[in-house]
């Protein structure tokens, strides 16, 4: 049998403790034979030892403990006087227990030792003799059969048979407290017969030995148990941890001083001190760390039992069980996790019939996953069940009065999901025994927040739900961002930090009512000024330009601070009771220079937000301010002149820039080319294809190289003007020539945004055709959802050039409408950030709709990010590509449509 | 939850109070000045006296909370005693009287100027007069008549009561 190493270690530590107790106790008992206290304690130690060894299937150990316990129970009940021979025998039993425990420690299994078997027989006989003695005294009942056979059988059987010794207790009238399941005599006799042949030999051997040395008793082993594990009071560890934190601070001060003094010897010793301190701190931290497996490992059983009682089939997968967390956190997440897993089974996973009906496997799958991510541990509970019906929440929110009908109508999915965490909100239609017992998701959330963690839910209706809990590695030391406000430092836990943005408060912030808002990639984020919240007297009109985007897991907010300093590992210290009623602090910390910094509580800060995001959107709508999203995204553009005309191209599209002499341009086969790095590169003059005034002769030209699929061409221009970062918000309609996407006024001059793909195609219609067209037999239809006209036109052009039929819409909502009217699309390409309905919501909507469940969707983005990517695929996308990487987008389409 | 905790603190504090004054014949007081008032608190509850420590303000805290300070790695709550007892005059908080507190974060009273250490016979400690001008009476537990002045003995438990 295989055990978890940790559990075995725990057992051994406990067993050693029990042994120490027993030895001490028996010696005590020898002196004072009437001491009931000692007898009871001995009985308890022996009893728990029996239980634990039984659990592990350590049969010899269990037997010894069992017989000893039986004797002790007689003593306890006053049926037996503990004379020296009894104590002697019990002490021997303890010696054997010690021997076995030591063997377990080194070999992880019980010893196979003839002497041990002999002792067992002796002990068993001894017990019987005592029992008989008692019975004779009471002069009742029939005598009991010789137990030797059974014991030997038991040992040879190993783990299979349970404590059948109980059968012998049957005729006894001695009251026994323990609730050991009693086997009927017949049953054990039956087993006996079956095993008889096998055990016969052994029994003979044993009988042999027994005869030989019946009177001289078996020698007991003398072993000293070495302590490899000790139990330490957690308080002591906490204190050590505190001191280590202090040591770090003291060390920092010494380091600062030594830098002033600049003495070589001092510097060296300070370095040594520094290293040792760091190592010590880490080691002390480690004493409190435990693998999360200690919690995870109890879930297979919970899941099994629960699934069974609900008539569901569930496979549980555990991942990352070795991820370590602070002990206190491990303790504290047990209950929330259990609740979440129960929820997943009860509400998430459908009954088998239902699953089969919707085309899922009969068995549901739950992943319980833990991994580290930037100073935090992420725990995910993922199920492939029915998901959460957001519409149901919407309805219920109104019914229960959480939202007005109007609010509910406007509420986004994320807002609705957040309602699950509100007290008194539960979507379970019927209260089952499993969930809905008053402990709701609100409690889960509060508990997780108490740990400084966050919780979020992602769900796709019909597909499943993922609950993601992020918690700090340790409660005592956390990574934090140090900011400055009103001349003092404040620490913001990294868990809550999303990103940092530099803003111009006058331009970028939007005031609605008394609350400021910032648009971050289309999302409206309420902005708080730290100095205002803290009511710090503002020193003049110094504008805070540093916006820290924070999340409580449920809502996102921006915090304007005077200065952003650095990230630091901070030691969290509690504040006194005087500050309990101030919601914005969660503690204080001591910085390297000995100064104090208050730690900000982001959940507390969020309470200062006046208006809700929904209200703002409502008001914005009323004011007819439309929220465009790609408007907010900026790109680096290259501005260049061709003669009199100014043109722009995203830099990302240009592979190289160089200067060439006019005489190096040759005409080969009627085409202008240059030789560039041993390659013949065709030269394109834009004025040949676009309505430009033309490029006058220059001694040298600037060439922009454009490479795709190892084919390179060059565009000739007169000079580079600038590179600027701007949005791709362009005016359409004025220039309707193919190859021009639109224009924009930059620095007082009209700049034409060119469609480089179109231009190249005009130059050579075959340029991009790389055995691509042949493969696409019938024109496949693509629905493109993109709010930026620049990208929309560009992508449409290059998709059409490939022979696809492309329909464009400007946001997710339109895409859905389009699909409902005309479902015959082979593929959907969608941007993420769009007004009204973004790419994520579109994806969800599609994946939740049986009609479009399998429609391939490619999500395109301006900038690739790992987190977004994960989310995109989680939501069921088939591809995730960068808009400007045309060839990769096409490659993906090809792959999905083939 | 919060209330429960407070209840508990109260219990601890009142226990402390009871066994203090009862049996001893004389009590040693650390005296200090708040404006013109000579005030005292029992010396045995003072852990240490510090001067000119750096105090970090805690915005949004009660007015009489000056902030927090770092005492060898411990966060100490600093209370402006003059403000707490409702002294009308403005004083410059300079000296920290750091109190021994059980369990929770320690508290320091800041005062303007420290006076003598006085040993006062228990029998001479009197009830405070009906009226005390310029300071709230609720925090004055007892008084002691000195030849030239009156010593106001503060009720520390009440001062620390949240």
Image (spheres, rainbow, N blue to C red):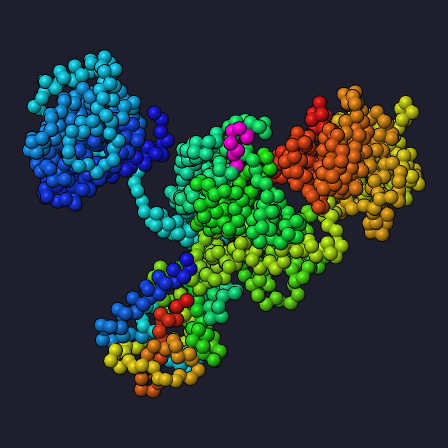
Asked whether residue A792 appears in the rendered view, the answer is yes
Residue A526 position, x and y percent, is 63, 55
Q: Residue at x 71, y 46 (%)?
A: A836
Q: In which quarter of the image is residue A23?
A: top left
Q: Which residue is drawn at 69% across and 48% down?
A: A522
Taking the image as shown, residue A764 lies to the left or right of residue A377, namely right
Asked whether residue A547 appears in the rendered view, the answer is no
Q: In which quarter of the image is the N terminus of chain A?
A: top left
Check the image and report above or below for A529 versus A791: below
Q: Which residue is drawn at 23% across and 36% down?
A: A178
Residue A229 position, x and y percent, is 30, 38
Q: Quadrant of the C terminus of chain A?
A: top right
Q: Residue furthest bottom?
A: B148
Taking the image as shown, residue A693 lies to the left or right of residue A339, namely right
A267 or B34: nearer the viewer: B34
Taking the image as shown, residue A735 lies to the left or right of residue A549, namely right
Q: Which residue is drawn at 21% across and 28% down?
A: A166
The main secondary structure of the magenta stretch is helix
Please count the marks in the image.
0
Residue A145 position, x and y percent, is 14, 22
Residue A46 position, x and y percent, is 21, 36
Check the image and report above or below for A404 versus A315: below
Taking the image as shown, residue A200 lies to the left or right of residue B148, namely left
Check the image and report above or below for B94 versus A84: below
A702 or A774: nearer the viewer: A774
B120 or A290: nearer the viewer: A290
Q: Is residue A152 magenta?
A: no
Q: Which range of residues does the magenta coloring cover? A: A348-355
Check the image and report above or below for A735 versus B45: above
């Amino acid at each position: 049998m295989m055990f978890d190493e940790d559990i075995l270690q725990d057992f051994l530590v406990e067993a050693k403790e029990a042994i120490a107790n027993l030895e001490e106790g028996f010696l005590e008992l020898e002196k004072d034979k009437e001491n009931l206290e000692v007898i009871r304690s001995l009985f308890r130690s022996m009893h728990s030892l029996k239980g634990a060894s039984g659990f592990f299937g350590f049969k010899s150990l269990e037997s010894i403990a069992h017989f000893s316990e039986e004797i002790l129970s007689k003593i306890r009940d006053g049926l037996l006087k503990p004379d020296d021979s009894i104590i002697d025998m019990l002490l021997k039993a303890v010696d054997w227990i010690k021997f076995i425990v030591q063997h377990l420690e080194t070999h992880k299994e019980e010893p196979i030792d003839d002497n041990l078997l002999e002792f067992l027989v002796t002990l068993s006989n001894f017990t019987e003799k005592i029992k008989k003695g008692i019975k004779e005294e009471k002069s009742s009942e029939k005598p009991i059969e010789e137990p030797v056979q059974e014991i030997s059988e038991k040992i040879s059987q190993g783990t299979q048979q349970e404590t059948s010794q109980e059968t012998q207790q049957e005729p006894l009238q001695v009251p026994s407290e323990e609730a050991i399941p009693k086997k009927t005599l017949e049953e054990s006799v039956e087993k006996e017969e079956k095993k008889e042949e096998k055990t016969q030999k052994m029994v003979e051997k044993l009988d042999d030995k027994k005869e030989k040395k019946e009177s001289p008793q078996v020698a007991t082993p003398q072993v000293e148990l070495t302590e490899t594990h000790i139990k330490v009071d957690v308080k002591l560890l906490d204190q050590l941890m505190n001191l280590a934190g202090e040591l770090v601070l003291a060390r920092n001060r010494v380091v600062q001083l030594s830098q002033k003094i600049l003495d070589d010897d001092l510097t060296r010793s300070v370095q040594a001190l520094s290293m040792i301190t760091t190592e010590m701190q880490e080691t002390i931290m480690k004493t409190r760390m435990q693998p999360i497996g200690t919690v995870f490992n109890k879930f297979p059983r919970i899941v099994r039992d629960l699934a069974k009682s609900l008539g569901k089939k569930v496979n549980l997968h555990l991942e990352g069980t070795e991820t370590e967390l602070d002990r206190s956190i491990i303790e504290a997440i047990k209950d929330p996790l259990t609740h979440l897993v129960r929820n997943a089974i009860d509400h998430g996973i459908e009954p088998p019939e239902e699953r089969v009906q919707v085309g899922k496997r009969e068995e549901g799958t739950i992943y319980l996953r833990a991994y580290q991510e930037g100073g935090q541990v992420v725990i995910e509970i993922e199920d492939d069940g029915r998901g959460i019906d957001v519409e149901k929440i919407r309805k219920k929110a109104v019914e229960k009065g959480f939202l007005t009908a109007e609010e509910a109508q406007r509420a986004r999915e994320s807002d609705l999901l957040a309602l699950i965490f509100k007290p008194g909100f539960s979507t379970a239609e019927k209260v089952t025994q499993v969930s809905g017992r008053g402990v709701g998701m609100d409690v889960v959330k509060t508990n997780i927040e108490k740990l400084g963690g966050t919780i979020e839910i992602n769900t796709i209706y019909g597909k499943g739900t993922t609950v993601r809990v992020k918690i700090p590695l340790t409660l005592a030391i956390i990574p934090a961002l140090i900011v400055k406000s009103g001349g003092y430092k404040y620490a913001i836990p990294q868990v809550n930090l999303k990103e940092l943005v530099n803003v111009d408060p006058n331009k970028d912030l939007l005031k609605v009512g008394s609350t400021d808002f910032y648009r971050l990639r289309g999302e409206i984020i309420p902005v708080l000024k730290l100095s205002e919240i803290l009511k710090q007297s503002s020193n003049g009109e110094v504008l805070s330009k540093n916006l820290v985007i924070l999340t409580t897991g449920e809502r996102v907010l921006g915090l304007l601070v005077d200065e952003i300093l650095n990230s630091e590992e901070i030691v969290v210290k509690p504040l006194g009771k005087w500050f309990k009623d101030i919601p914005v602090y969660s503690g204080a910390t001591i910085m390297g220079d000995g100064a104090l910094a208050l730690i900000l509580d982001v959940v507390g800060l969020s309470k200062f937000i006046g208006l809700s995001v929904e209200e703002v959107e409502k008001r914005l709508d009323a004011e007819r301010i439309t929220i465009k999203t790609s408007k907010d995204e900026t790109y680096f553009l290259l501005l260049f002149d061709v003669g009199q005309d100014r043109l722009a191209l995203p830099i990302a599209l240009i592979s190289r820039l160089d200067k060439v002499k006019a005489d190096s341009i040759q005409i080969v086969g009627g085409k202008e080319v240059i030789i560039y790095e041993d390659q013949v590169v065709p030269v394109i003059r834009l004025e040949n294809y676009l309505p430009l005034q033309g490029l006058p002769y220059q001694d040298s030209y600037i060439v922009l190289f454009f490479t795709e699929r190892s084919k390179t061409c060059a565009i000739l221009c007169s000079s580079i003007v600038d590179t600027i970062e701007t949005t791709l918000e362009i005016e359409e309609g004025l220039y309707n020539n193919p190859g021009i996407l639109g224009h924009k006024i930059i620095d007082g001059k009209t700049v034409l945004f060119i469609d480089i793909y179109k231009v190249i195609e005009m130059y050579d219609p075959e340029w991009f055709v790389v055995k691509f067209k042949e493969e696409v037999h019938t024109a496949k239809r693509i629905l493109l959802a993109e709010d930026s006209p620049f990208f929309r036109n560009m992508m449409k052009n290059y998709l059409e050039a490939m022979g696809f039929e492309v329909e464009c819409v400007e946001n997710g909502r339109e895409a859905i409408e389009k699909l409902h009217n005309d479902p015959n699309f082979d593929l959907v390409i969608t941007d993420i950030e769009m007004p009204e309905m973004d790419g994520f919501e579109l994806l969800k909507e599609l994946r939740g709709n049986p009609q479009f469940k399998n429609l391939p969707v490619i999500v395109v983005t301006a900038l690739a990010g790992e987190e977004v990517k994960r989310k995109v695929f989680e939501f069921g996308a088939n591809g995730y590509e960068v808009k400007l990487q045309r060839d990769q987008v096409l490659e993906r389409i090809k792959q999905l449509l083939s | 939850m919060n209330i429960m905790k407070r209840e508990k603190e109260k219990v601890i504090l009142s226990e402390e109070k009871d066994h203090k004054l009862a049996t001893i014949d004389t009590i040693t007081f650390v005296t200090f000045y708040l404006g013109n008032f000579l005030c005292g608190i029992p010396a045995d509850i003072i852990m240490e006296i510090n001067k000119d420590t750096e105090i970090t303000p805690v915005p949004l805290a009660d007015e009489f909370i000056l902030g927090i300070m770092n005492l060898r790695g411990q966060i100490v709550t600093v209370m402006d005693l003059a403000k707490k007892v409702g002294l009308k005059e403005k004083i410059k908080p300079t000296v920290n009287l750091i109190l021994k507190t059980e369990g929770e974060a320690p508290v320091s009273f800041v005062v303007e100027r420290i006076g003598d250490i006085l040993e006062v016979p228990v029998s001479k400690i009197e009830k405070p007069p009906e009226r005390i001008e310029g300071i709230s009476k609720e925090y004055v537990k007892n008084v002691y008549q000195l030849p030239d002045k009156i010593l106001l003995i503060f009720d520390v438990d009440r001062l620390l009561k949240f």
